[in-house]
Image (tube, grey):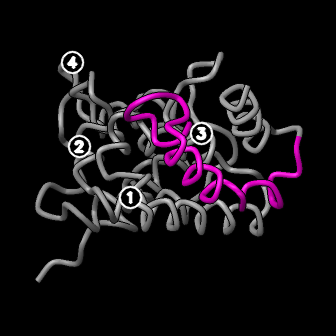
Amino acid sequence: MLFLNHCHFMKMVTSPCVDSATAISFLPLLAEEGCRLNVGGEGMRGGLIPRSDGGNNVLNRLVWGEGSKEEDEKSLKVMEKLCELDLFKKEDIKNFDLLFESLDGGMITPQIFEMLVNWDPDALKKHDRSSEKSLLNNDDHSKDTFEIVLKAGMEHFPDEFGLLFQKFRGKTACETAFDNFGANVVMPIICRWIPPSE
């Protein structure tokens, strides 16, 4: 019964139907207590890791934007607290495709994306366990998302031109962006983030 109540609460806390700005602050306490009681079984970190019906877990839901700065800041604080408790781990970023999720799950949350990419910049090169695709080389990006990812790539991989020329299935991220948005839109974005020449 405790397991069912715990799982129900974990799901409820990350539900879009609940006042998540208030409820989300209980996640670290709940996960810590869940670990103590071995909720979800061995290695499930107190119920943070099991995937729900939709295929996402609590960590996926945490990185999705909620649409308000206050809620996103609370999510960021919760993630930082989970890191301190060793319940949120660096490998989770790739294992659960959290960089992509932070850009795709709901509203774009640049501060959460930045925290994740600063913790694991290599996740930009291969953003999940099953793909050789860089996060930049994605047909689903909007031009704003493309710019956020390119900026991060340029900051972390300036010698590789922000991964613009990394190929996936014979096509570079630059070519994908040209196809999706046109050179007249993409070139000014690229020029904004190319590191200055020495």
Spot occupied by residue 176 in the image (x, y as percentages of width and height): 36, 31
N-term mark: 4 or 1: 1
Is residue 142 something one can see in this rendering? no
Q: Quick check: marks 4 and 1 in contact, CB under 8 Å?
A: no
Residue at position x 26%, y 57% in the image: 121
The residue at which mark 3 appears reads as 58
What number is the disc on residue 169? 4
Q: Which residues are magenta?
A: 18-47
Q: Which residue is mark 1?
A: 86
The spot of residue 142 in percent (x, y) is 56, 40
Q: Is residue 157 left or right of residue 34?
A: left
Residue sitting at 44 percent across and 63 percent down? 85
Q: What's the residue type where badge 2 is placed? A: Lys
Pointer 1: residues within 10 angstroms few (<14), some, or many (20+)? few
Local secondary structure at mark 2:
loop
x and y percentages locating residue 43 in the rendered image: 38, 35
| Pointers 4 and 2 in contact (C-beta within 8 Å) | no
**Rendering quarter of residue 68:** bottom right
Mark-to-mark CA distance, 3 and 2 = 24 Å
| Dot in front, 3 or 2 | 3
* Distance (Cα) linking label 4 and label 2: 14 Å
Number of the front mark, 3 or 1: 1
Q: Residue at x 48, y 30 (%)?
A: 180
Q: Secondary structure at mark 3?
A: helix
Left or right? Give the position of 4 relative to 150: right
Q: Which residue is mark 2?
A: 125
Disc 3 or 4, which lies upstream in sequence?
Answer: 3
Task: Find the distance from the CA under tag 2 to the CA under tag 1.
Answer: 25 Å
Q: Give the total number of marks visible in the rendering.
A: 4
